[in-house]
Amino acid sequence: MSCCSEPIAQKGRLTCPACGQRCLPVSRQTMLHQIQAPKNQQIHAADYAFCANRTCSTGYVSLHKVIPKSELRAFQPGQPAMLCHCFDISEATYRTALGDGTAAAIKAFVIQQTKGSLCACESRNPSGRCCLGSFQKMEKAHD
Ligand SMILES: [Zn+2]
């Protein structure tokens, strides 16, 4: 990687060197659970962030290292694009549900589990974050 393609830290966030999108910080725990073995045994302490751009090859990025999505468990060939990693709801499933009127029940289920602290976003979601915002984005896109 040349010095020019090094990601630039901005207010605690990182910019993806491949797509230029802002990446949000991610915890080491999330990375340990997302990166395939044996590479997850070689994560050194650093501030990493996740590139949420589905079409970008970057998975996690620090000031000195890029870990590609191809090394992450959630982005293996044949795996559907997931909306809710905790409860196994794909984007395609929710899109269909938005069309046939069953989306509200699915979302209510996820919200109920989240309220009961039964979600596992930090381990299951490559971003380490709650997926409910992604539900809202899909709902807006559907309107
Ligand atoms: Zn990117």
Image: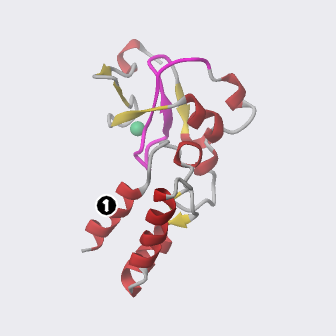
View extreme (front): residue: 116
Residue type at mark 1: give it.
Lys
Q: Is residue 20 above or below residue 124?
A: above
For the record, the magenta segment spans 44-64
Mark 1 is surrounded, within 10 Å at the Cα level, by few (under 14), some (14 to 19) or many (20 or more) other residues, namely few
Give the residue displayed 42% in from the left and 44% down from the top. 52
Task: Work out whether residue 94 can be spotted.
Answer: yes
For the C terminus, the quadrant is bottom left
The residue wearing badge 1 is 137
Give the residue displayed 58% in from the left and 63% down from the top. 88
Coordinates of residue 7 in the picture (x, y in percent): 38, 22
7 in the magenta segment: no
Task: Work out whether residue 82 can be spotted.
Answer: no
Picture quarter containing residue 68?
top right
63 in the magenta segment: yes
Callout 1: CB less than 8 Å from ligand 1: no
Q: In this view, does 11 lie above or below 132?
A: above
Which structural element holds mark 1?
helix
